[in-house]
Amino acid sequence: MKRERTGLRVFALTGAVVATVLVLAACTTSATQQKPASPPAPPNNNGFQVAPDFQITVYQGEGFQPGQKVKLSDLLAQGKPVVLNMFAGRCPPCRLEMPDLQAANEEFKDDVLLFGLDVGPFTGLGSREDGRALLRELNVTYSTGTTFDGSIIRSYRVRGMPTTIFITPQGQIVQTWTGLLTKAKLIELVGNLRVASRTS
């Protein structure tokens, strides 16, 4: 009887692990199933890819009105580096990293703009309402919004979720990070972005 209970526990644990792996795999692969038309922007003279411009509909953020339409170029025109974090409402790694992004933002928000971009509808990982619900649930206050331009999945070479793009005020992509970010790693990468922004 004891052996049978142990076997059931092992079976249940194995099933939970398999389910978790499948969910994480969905976050990684679903973003690559999109086939938007526009090609990635070519590199500029410094060898960095130029961040393609696109329209954003704002959810929330200091200095923004909900529903306001802005472009990425408008964000860059503020003169700060931009950390563009692509997330989705039903992406488990996105949910896990958001509290760390919130905490890190408190440390660098004066000179770097963190902007969360909900791309759930283009990755099969939730609707825009799912994205807004996740922000409310986790008390996220940094600037966020969404886009209706599905071509950004290809033009930004999104390979998995979440994807975070580090952009200088001049519009140069200096790094793309695929997967979960911790507070410490994000602060490290923001440091690199600051250096690149001064030298670009």
Image (spheres, rainbow, N blue to C red):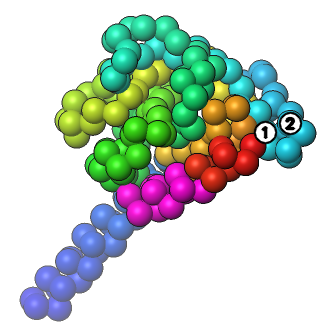
Q: Where does residue 169 sit, x and y in percent of width and height? A: 63, 33
Is mark 2 in CB contact (under 8 Å) with mark 1?
yes
Residue at the location (76% across, 33% down)? 50
Res 153 → quadrant? top right
Q: Nearer the viewer, residue 111 or 137?
A: 111
The circle drawn on residue 44 is 2
Q: Which residues are magenta?
A: 179-192
Q: Nearer the viewer, residue 66 or 105?
A: 105
Mark 2 crowdedness (10 Å alpha carbons): few <14, some 14-19, many ≥20: few
- Looking at the rendered structure, the kind of residue marked 2 is Asn
Q: Where does residue 191 sit, x and y in percent of width and height? A: 54, 56
Q: Where does residue 150 sit, x and y in percent of width and height? A: 62, 21
Residue lying farthest to the top in this orientation: 68
Which image quadrant: the C terminus? top right
Q: Where does residue 177 sit, x and y in percent of width and height? A: 59, 52
Q: Is residue 93 left or right of residue 138?
A: right
Q: Is residue 7 above or below residue 71?
A: below
- Looking at the rendered structure, the kind of residue marked 1 is Gln
Q: Secondary structure at mark 1?
A: strand
Spatial CA distance of label 2 from label 1 is 6 Å
Q: Is residue 119 visible?
A: yes
Residue at the location (65% across, 44% down)? 197
Q: Is residue 171 above or below residue 150?
A: below
Q: Is residue 183 magenta?
A: yes
Residue at the location (85% across, 38% down)? 43
Name the residue beneath numbered marker 1: 49
Per the picture, the main secondary structure of the magenta-coloured stretch is helix
Q: Is residue 192 left or right of residue 139?
A: right
Q: Secondary structure at mark 2?
A: loop
Mark 1 crowdedness (10 Å alpha carbons): few <14, some 14-19, many ≥20: some
Residue at the location (50% across, 61% down)? 188
- Of tags 2 and 1, which is closer to the observer? 2
